[in-house]
Amino acid sequence: MTDTTKPLQGTTILMSGGSRGIGLAIALRAAADGANIALLAKTDTPHPKLEGTIHTAAEQIQQAGGQALPIVGDVRDDDMVTEAVMTTAGEFGGVDVIINNASVIDLSPSMDLAVKKYDLMQDVNVRGTFMLSRAAIPMLRESANPHIVSLSPPLNLSPKWLGAHTGYTLAKYGMTMVTLGLAAEFADDGIAANTLWPRTTIATAAVQNLLGGDRVMAASRTPEIYADAAYEVITQPSRKRTGETLIVEDVLEQAGVTDFSRYAAVPGTPDDKLFPDIFLD
């Protein structure tokens, strides 16, 4: 019998990335319900500048109450993606949720952006989202509550954002367009596909290293706010909400959350002092 207080108990999630940061926070939130979580990630050995590997993430998931399946692989490799879906389904009996978390960021202006970095962002962010989601469609069709969630922003066509970092903007908007396209294409199958993006920056290694260091980190929210919002999305009936570009704080407000102070990276930081995330006016 399903525990109604733990709606993700027995649910199988396959996530790209997830060794650290937002992806790991989402995994741990689901693990508290007893979810099965497979991680398709490259970080097999410790990185000199980044905490966590796919193996330490799996240990944390198990400690939180979930079942973990670390799959060392690259979302850019089609064979690895297919194998990850099949291995996950073989281990847990199916796939219910895809979380497109893996993403590459480079905010360089167009003339400074390395060609290899442009290609990498397209391959991981856009192509990876499409290929992992597509590979899982046959399994999602068999799920009682299938969801695809991509960590990407609304399509804001303001020149402020289109011109800020064109290569990265294109890659993140590409993730969103893939997701909205899948929502429309597989609506009759009851497969929900939504994107999720925060109003403020999130205290992660990317923010620390690329967006402003300690100053921005101190004015950010913790990854747990993203995790709680993702939890709200994937526990909804899949036919009820699909094809939306959701905002983290809006999702939580709709769920009854009125006080976000506990998510401040530095306790006591007022909301009006938090650093706004990109792509949102």
Image: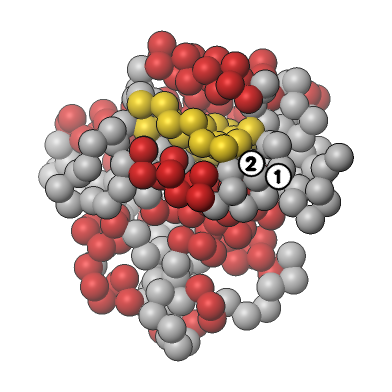
Q: Amino acid at mark 1?
A: Leu
The image shows residue 76, relative to residue 242, as above or below, that is above
The alpha-carbon separation of the residues under discs 2 and 1 comes to 5 Å
Extreme residue in the top direction: 79
Amino acid bearing label 2: Ala
Quarter residue 123 falls in = top left
Between 157 and 273, the one nearer to me in the picture = 273
Q: Secondary structure at mark 1?
A: loop
Horizontal and vertical percent position of residue 100: 49, 37
Residue 35 disc label: 2
Which colouring convention does the figure follow?
Answer: secondary structure
Q: Residues within 10 Å of mark 1 (few under 14, many from 20)?
A: many
Neighbourhood count class around disc 2 (C-alpha, 10 Å): few under 14, some 14–19, many 20 upward? many
Q: Quadrant of residue 35?
A: top right
Asked whether, in this view, residue 65 is left or right of residue 208, the answer is right
Please indicate whether residue 148 sits to the left or right of residue 210 in the image: right
The quadrant holding residue 98 is: top right
Task: Compare residues 216 and 245 and report the one nearer the observer.
Answer: 216
Residue drawn where x is 76% and y is 35% of the image: 145
Is residue 136 visible in the rendered image? The answer is no
Residue for badge 1:
8
Pointer 2 with pointer 1, Cβ within 8 A: yes
